[in-house]
Image: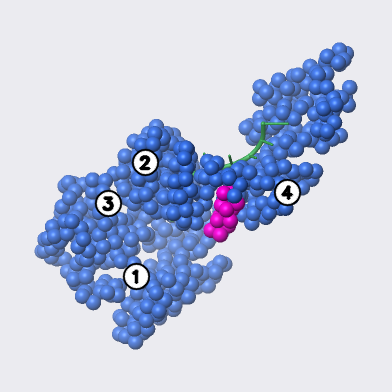
Amino acid sequence: MKAISKLKWMMPPSLSRHFSHTPIASRNVSNYSLSSLLDDFTRFCYQRDLPRAIRAMDAMQSHGLHADAVTYSELIKCCLSRRAVAEAKLVRNHIFSGGYYPKTFLVNTLLNMYVKFDLLEEAQAMFDQMPERNVVSWTVMISAYCKLKLNNKALEFMILMLRDGVRPNMFTYSSVLRACDSLVNVRQLHCGIIKVGLDSDVFVRSALIDIYAKWGELRCAVSVFNEMVTGDFVVWNSIIGAFAQNNDGDGALNLFKRMKRAGFEANQPTLTSVLRACTGLALLELGTQVHVHVLKYDRDLILNNALLDMYCKCGSLEDAKSLFNRMVERDVISWSTMIAGLAQNGYSREALELFESMKLSGTKPNYITFLGILFACSHAGLLEDGWSHFRSMRNVYGIDPGREHYGCMIDLLGRAGKLGEALRLIEEMECEPDAITWRPLLDACRIHRNMDVAEYAAKQVLNLDPEDAGTYILLSNIYANSQRWEDVAEVRKTMRERGVRKEPGCSWIEVNKQIHAFILGDSSHPQAVQINRQLNLLIYKLREVGYVPDTSFVLRDLEGEQKEDSIRYHSEKLAIAFGLMSLSRGKTIRIRKNLRICGDCHIFAKLTAKVEHCTIVIRDPIRYHHFQDGICSCGDYW
DNA sequence: GTAGGGTTAG
């Protein structure tokens, strides 16, 4: 009897057709109790009643009884959904306690279970012992390695699979695409996909769009998207996310409109991508509009985090703080976003206080949290706090400081004028210093006018990043300051030879949900004449209260020979003038720019805020300046 | 029957 019940499920396919699948009870009435044991087990499995199913399984085991593979797979699903690892192991042992090797499909289910429980080594051991592996077995392993970002391993498995004569299907491709660590890889796989006609599968399509976007090939992503005949909302989300990721906020927003016109409703991932696009463009008005859509998902953590970031990046701290306080659930990302947001907007003390609340709340800070903390310390010149948080990273939280943390500390020491200590810290670093490490030291040298260290630091940056236009200009300015004209000429020659071009200063402002861009001295704006008139008027008014253009900053521009004239038309000044004339009184003027603000524009903005009784927020690539009543939130320290 | 897609902080 025992033997028959075992054979019922473990029989090799070739033999099983010779045996009847008639219930055991009907063959032998005296074994009725065994049959009911099996029935109980089956029922509990399908009812997802894990404790009773396990008890029934124990009882069966003592009689050597086994159920069919589908029932076991139900039980495994139940263990998975309850994250019951110990029970899952009991099930595995029971399944393997028979005389035959279980069916491939059942082992695949077990494999998947190990992977989901992050027991990859055990999964790998089981995979190695499998007498036969089908496309599912291979795909489970490949997608497990993809998820762990062990890309090489995933691609290696793909090759082993092909050598084994198993053909990849759409499941395999949609997983393995993520493992591509070069565009060449993506294209090779794409060829294979087209060859076997799997390019029409929507999963494969969204994976292709995603990976092309990751490698910056938006055009390829768009062609994959355009080939789609039937709509699919995840593919829409992929392409919107692709544009958002590649900093093409306009493209993302246009697609979002098209998606809505095509009759697809925006869900959380869509809205998160759209928010990311608004964040990148600092579109507060549009972002606030998206907030209305988000209300439907007001408990969604990821979406709230994206919204929080949008408010921080748009420099609207009041909205950010009120959202943060309302959030029912907060994770390390919410806290880190809020801390970094406060720090970047000049509220360093508040950022550090929030960090204390975070610790009290029981959320563990991570690598990124500390970047915000150290940024807060460095931008407020809090030397002691900086050191103590920096040391606590390893001592208290077991996080090894990375280059970026060292960069913050070097920034902090450098700004405090401790250039020697900063240099020593670079020498002490365990990781190789890179351009990001040297650049803050270079900035500090400029502030403290230490030409020797500056020259050294600039050369280090250019060794590591020969394309860094800002550093060439800084170096040439340092030489110019010391009247070393031959060296100035040499730097400019190197720049020309290497084809390095200075990015022109550009500022953006949102008026009536339209973005207006201004470039240094640009007169292409339809209202250029009025803007110039407004700007001149403003400068006249500011001179009355003591504004003197600070031409020493002109030295930062290679093209700055015309001195006062060139800074007069810096892009942020044009944007401020335009904001004053087109926004209603009392509305905050929000400007985003691609380069860091110069000292003259900083004074200009402070005085404008005072004279015109308005608030101006300028976001540069690193931080934010809130100008109000003649002062700036950065405390003139940036 | 078992395996696959889109979203958040530097």
At horizontal 83% and vertical 15% (from top left) the residue drawn is A25
**For residue A180: magenta?**
yes
**Is residue A174 toward the left or the right of residue A358 in the image?**
right
Write down the residue under mark 3. A515
Disc 4 secondary structure class? loop
Give amino acid for label 4: Gly
Q: Which residues are magenta?
A: A179-194
Report the mark closest to the observer, 1 or 2: 2
Give the color of chain A as drawn: blue
Q: Nearer the viewer, residue A410 or A19?
A: A19
Is label 3 on the same chain as label 4? yes
Seen in the picture, residue A514 relative to A23 is either above or below; the reply is: below
Residue A310 seen in the figure: no
State which tag comes first along the sequence, 1 or 2. Answer: 2
Q: Quadrant of residue A372?
A: bottom left
The amino acid type found where label 3 is placed reads: Ile
> Residue A552's x, y, as percent?
25, 74
Residue A502 has which mark? 1
Q: CA distance from mark 3 to mark 2?
A: 20 Å
Q: Earlier in the sequence, mark 4 or mark 2?
A: 4
Going from the N terminus, do you reach mark 3 or mark 1 first?
1
Q: Which residue is mark 4?
A: A165
Report, in whole angstroms, how far the alpha carbon at label 1 lies from the one at label 2: 36 Å
Q: Residue at x 39, y 54 (%)?
A: A247
Q: Colour of chain B?
A: green
